[in-house]
């Protein structure tokens, strides 16, 4: 029972070797060996150019505390395997097509129930906050996962500057919607009501783990990963971590979010990682930690709140997580 | 063309065409070009090609009616290829997503309608593949044609499988669906007229 508890409520202090099956390590070794050779060539194409040439170095404080250092998903995987439906529904579409998006100049408007509504520009985002590295597990609702070294600042740092009013209870986010630069939004089969929207409860938004990322692997974000500014909420499914944000509003009503609007039975507002609440079309009990392969699928058990329960479980005290999925 | 290509050569070409998508997937896989989740790509690839091949098989009769019997003659080869692709697709699902865990497979079949219809489609193909030999055809006689009409419900199930799987962009499912409905309408009209 004791070990079960520890597995369910892990925090950063547990050695990663305790959480991770040995096969993952072995597989990773094999992977490193493979990448040292010439076999690892799938980063070819526009996406690779995006991720290696256009990205600027960032000054940040490294995540020395992380026990996930050794498990980081290779940068090629992080930047070529993305869900960013504005650029197409295939995982490789964003890396191929997101370069069309203009990210400089960039303006984020912050408004709603705040004392000082205003705007932030690209320069403010990159140099106006103390940047830090956070190595987080990232669990997609589609049952694959990665470990990503993000560079960013807590969302609470940004919200405090605009002074949320006392009646504010939620935060709403919107992604850029610019059809001329986003081929996925022009697909006739696409049934998402653009722009992409997401939301958090205000206490979730103010939680110290909730990050606004401007970079990964030490440099600014590639477009396919949500440049220049994206949300990262490590204990929730990846679709909550909205990309390329242009609007942040504090509200008193729970905001309508894109996936919930589209399929409310499949995607809830909370979307906390939870192995006991299945997606109606697939089980959430396991995830494939990428890179995965046919003979080593790298299936690992999914952990409640993606392993961040010790820090965040208190946000949901007394809530039925099956009902508020 | 008959004077250029012998029947044997044509058979070679058709078989090669059936193998090309699979060979391409295998080559990309071996070359490490399929990204960090190659198993999913190969699984989707084999599934997609199975459905495309299936729709091609169903096109054979209308084309033959219009005077081009090329496809019609190779329905069996194509049909067997469809079954091979569908079987690989199923095996990959068992290996990568289910991990050969029988209770988990039962749970998937019970709770995931798309898994159930996909599996049912494959199960309907199984007797068709098994009775694709000349001997089986002779043995079954008139019942063979009746049995092989199962290809229509199997196609409906296979289509439902991809339609229910689509997360937000249903363009591909709609194209296949439109094609299939077109084929069905043609078939109904033939039945009524004939």
Image: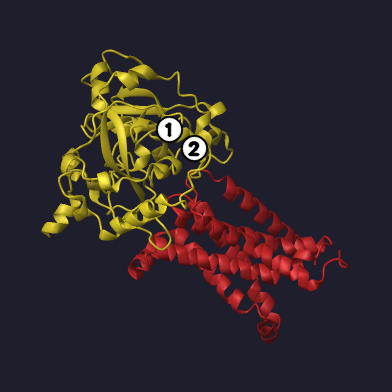
Q: Which residue carries the number 1 mark?
A: A222
Residue at mark 1: chain: A
Position in image of residue B167 (x %, y %): 47, 46
Residue B115 in the figure: left or right of residue A288: right
Q: Which residue carries the number 2 mark?
A: A47
Position in image of residue A227 (x %, y %): 41, 29
Residue B150 in view in this figure: no
Which of these two is toward me, A243 or A225?
A225
In the rendered image, what is the letter of the chain coloured yellow?
A: A
Q: Which residue is drawn at the image coordinates 68% and 85% (left, top)?
A: B135
Which of these two is toward me, B31 or B185?
B31
**Where, quadrant-wise, is the C terminus of chain A in this rendering?**
top left
Residue B194 lies in quadrant: bottom right
Q: Which residue is drawn at the image coordinates 67% and 53% (left, top)?
A: B179
In the rendered image, what is the letter of the chain coloured red?
A: B
Q: Which residue is drawn at the image coordinates 48% and 31% (left, top)?
A: A194
Badge 2: residue crowd in 10 Å (few <14, some 14–19, many ≥20): many
Which of these two is toward me, A88 or B171?
A88
């Amino acid at each position: 029972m004791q070990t079960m508890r520890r597995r369910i409520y892990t925090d950063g202090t547990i050695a990663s070797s305790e959480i991770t099956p040995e096969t993952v390590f072995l597989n990773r070794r094999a992977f490193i060996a493979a990448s040292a050779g010439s076999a690892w060539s799938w980063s070819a194409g526009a996406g690779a150019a995006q991720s290696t040439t256009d990205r600027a170095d960032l000054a940040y404080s490294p995540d020395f505390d992380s026990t996930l250092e050794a498990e980081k998903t290779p940068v090629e995987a992080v930047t070529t395997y993305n869900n960013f439906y504005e650029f197409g529904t295939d995982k490789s579409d964003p890396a191929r097509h997101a370069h069309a998006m203009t990210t400089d100049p960039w303006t984020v408007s912050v408004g709603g129930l705040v004392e000082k509504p205003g705007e932030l520009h690209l320069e403010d985002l990159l140099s106006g906050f103390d940047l830090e590295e956070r190595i987080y597990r990232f669990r997609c609702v589609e049952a694959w996962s990665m470990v990503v070294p993000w560079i960013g600042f807590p969302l609470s740092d940004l919200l405090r500057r605009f002074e949320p009013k006392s009646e504010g209870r939620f935060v709403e986010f919107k992604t850029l919607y610019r059809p001329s630069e986003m081929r996925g939004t022009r697909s006739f089969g696409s049934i998402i009501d653009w722009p992409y929207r997401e939301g958090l409860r205000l206490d979730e938004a103010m939680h110290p783990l909730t990050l606004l990322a401007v970079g990964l692997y030490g440099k600014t974000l590639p477009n396919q990963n949500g440049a220049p500014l994206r949300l990262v909420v490590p204990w929730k499914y990846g679709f909550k971590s909205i990309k390329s944000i242009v609007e942040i509003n504090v509200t008193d009503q729970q905001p309508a979010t894109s996936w919930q609007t589209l399929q409310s039975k499949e995607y809830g507002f909370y979307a906390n990682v939870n192995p006991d609440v299945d997606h109606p079309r697939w089980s959430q009990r396991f995830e494939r930690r990428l890179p995965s392969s046919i003979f080593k699928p790298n299936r690992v058990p999914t952990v409640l709140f993606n392993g961040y329960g010790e820090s965040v479980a208190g946000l949901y005290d007394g809530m039925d997580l099956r009902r508020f999925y | 063309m008959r004077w250029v290509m012998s029947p044997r050569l044509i058979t070679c070409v058709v078989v090669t065409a059936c193998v090309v998508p699979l060979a391409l997937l295998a080559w990309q896989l071996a070359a490490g070009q399929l990204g960090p989740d190659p198993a999913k790509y190969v699984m989707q690839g084999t599934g997609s090609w199975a459905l495309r091949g299936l729709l091609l098989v169903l096109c054979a009769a209308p084309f033959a009616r219009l005077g081009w019997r090329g496809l019609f003659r190779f329905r069996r080869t194509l049909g067997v290829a469809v079954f091979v692709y569908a079987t690989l697709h199923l095996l990959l699902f068992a290996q990568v997503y289910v991990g050969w865990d029988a209770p988990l497979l039962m749970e998937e079949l019970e709770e995931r309608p798309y898994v159930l219809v996909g599996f049912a489609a494959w199960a309907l193909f199984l007797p068709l593949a098994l009775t694709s030999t000349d001997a089986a055809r002779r043995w079954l006689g008139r019942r063979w044609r009746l049995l092989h009409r199962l290809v229509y419900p199997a196609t409906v199930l296979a289509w439902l499988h991809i339609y229910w799987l689509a997360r937000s962009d249903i363009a591909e499912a709609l194209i296949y669906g439109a094609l299939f409905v077109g084929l069905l309408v043609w078939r109904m009209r033939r039945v009524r007229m004939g």
